[in-house]
Amino acid sequence: MGANETNVESKEYRLSREVKEALQAIASEWEDVIDSKALQVIPLKGAMTNEVFQIKWPTRESGPSRKVLVRIYGEGVGIFFDREDEIRTFEFMSKHGHGPLLLARFGNGRIEEFLHARTLSASDLRDLVISGRIATRMKEFHGLDMPGVKKALLWDRLRKWLVACKRLASPEEAKSFRLDVMEMEINLLEKSLFKSDEKIGFCHNDLQYGNIMMDEETKAITIIDYEYACYNPVAYDIANHFCEMAADYHTDTPHIMDYSKYPGVEERKRFVKTYMSRSGVEERKRFVKTYMSRSGEEQPSDTMVKNLLEDVEKYTLASHLTWGLWGIISEHVNEIDFDYMEYARQRLNQYWLTKQRLIGNP
């Protein structure tokens, strides 16, 4: 997940010799760096899957210092995704103008280009202009022609994570989180939400504010961190983004979700309308076919928006299950300072609270 800079004392000792040597090799290629060994290490706050550091070197000119980003992979996260797949996605994104360049790899991490843009804050997601730009960028992301099978991986992922949860959780935790009925819930959701004509795209699946950056001059939006990216229903990705508006990972209680901040009807409608208006001609035809087929109206705009919004709302349930299971697993495999278990409890509580309203309670 994303990270923001925080004023923490330099902790160079936390980086291994392998990482330092890789950093020095990069810096030695830059003629304006005074001393490739004189690196400053600044931990970045807000990451919940990896440790992330900004690295700076002093330069001869009076201009800005040279910077890169070091990402050290979290322990045990192989349960969640295949790191080699994630690296391939990262490299594909770089080649197609999305995200930072990959500068080097080492045993348990990588070094990336430092983007001269700011990571968004929780409040930025509510800014009408910024939100519109995110919708546009998300639409472009969903249209990427990534290699691999173009089918939704959401349901397989949920079942795989549930198996891991049952293996790692104590009997008390399993009972508290009702893991015994979770497979039935996943089956129910898949049956309720799946449509043969639903729009599948390459989804980020973790579009919280810390994974979105904006160039302050051009206002261009860049989506970063592709650990969880894969093909999925686009309605799920939008739903997950809406759920993230209830989060602020830079407070004293970063694990607490405030669902009063979930976007209202008009805000959701505006986002979806912007998202759909950025469709190309062929893309728009597919959307019309998918989201008009249920009504038969001649004028697509309002009907298309309404139908996609209905799907998005239902997919918030899948988002709650996903991150609920993620939290339970993370509590057992990740040592980052975050109350994963309480986070999981909130997400799964929200699932049970909203399930009947959204899909009924068979």
Image: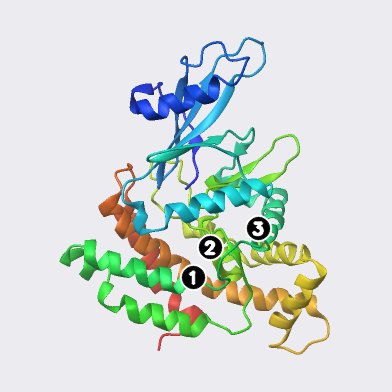
Query: What residue did someone put label 1 on?
Result: 153
Query: Which label was assigned to residue 282?
Result: none
Judged from the image, the secondary structure of the residue bearing numbered disc 2 is strand
Q: In the image, is 194 to the left or to the right of 341?
A: right
Q: Position of residue 270 (x, y in %)?
A: 71, 63
- Residue type of the residue flagged with mark 3: Phe
**Label 2 or label 1, whichever comes before in sequence order:** 1
Q: In the image, is 280 to the left or to the right of 189?
A: right
- Residue contact between numbered discs 2 and 1, judged by CB atoms under 8 Å: yes
Q: Position of residue 180 (x, y in %)?
A: 25, 76
Structural distance between the alpha carbons of marks 2 and 1 = 7 Å
Is residue 98 at all visible to an observer of this figure?
no
Query: What residue did someone put label 3 on?
Result: 141
Which image quadrant is residue 100 in? top right
Picture layout, residue 253 above or below residue 234? above
- Residue type of the residue flagged with mark 1: Leu
The answer to which of 27 and 319 lies nearer the viewer is: 27
Q: Quadrant of the C terminus?
A: bottom left
- Residue type of the residue flagged with mark 2: Cys
Q: Residue at x 79, y 79 (%)?
A: 300
